[in-house]
Image (tube, grey):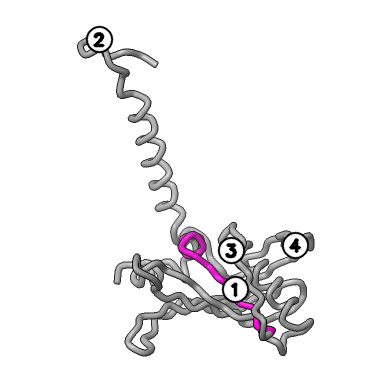
Amino acid sequence: MGRCVSAGRPSPRPSRRRDRRRLEKVVEEGKAWGSLTLKDFEKKVEVNGRTYIVKVIGGEAVEEERGGRELLRIKITAEVGGVRHDYTITYGRRGRNNAAVGRAYAKADAPGGRQADAERFSALIKTLTGKEPRVIERGDGRIDIICGREHLDGFMRYAELADVIEEWLRQ
């Protein structure tokens, strides 16, 4: 690391490089928003040791108001592991810091039951966002699928979802 000649302290260059890398990352993410389309998106992904082929048929994001709260519903129709299904994730604001948290529930009437539906849902989310969601099995048999802000940022890469998500985040 170089020394600043006039003050004898370390040169500010390393922090400038770090700032530049951060700025480049933000610019790349901005370019990525809305750059892909959900329709006819296809990819292989591995979840819990199983490989799934995910074929997205379509999707949309819709803002709703329920009980005085603004919600964001992301609806995706996809074929995961040979099973076609409509998947819905509902985002709301939670906690003191108003964090965006998405919730979905595995359906008992899905082929293979709740556990298989939760795995397929996780495969879909991992395919679209690059990150696996948290899966929580409750004592009553329900399975919750929890998504965070990082998943929402991943969904923003798709043209069908980007504008509505961005608008919802501004509120």
Disc 2 target residue: 5
Label 2 secondary element: loop
* Label 2 close to label 1 by CB (< 8 Å): no
- Residue for point 66% across, 86% down: 140
Front residue of 101 and 120: 101
Label 1 secondary element: strand
Left or right of 122 on screen, residue 68 = left
Q: Which label lies toward us, 1 or 3? A: 1
Left or right of 130 on screen, residue 22 = left
Q: Which residues are magenta?
A: 141-155
Disc 4 target residue: 48
What's the residue type where badge 1 is placed? Answer: Ile
Q: Position of residue 97 (x, y in %)?
A: 34, 65
What's the residue type where badge 4 is placed? Answer: Asn
Disc 1 target residue: 145
Q: CA distance from mark 3 to mark 4?
A: 17 Å
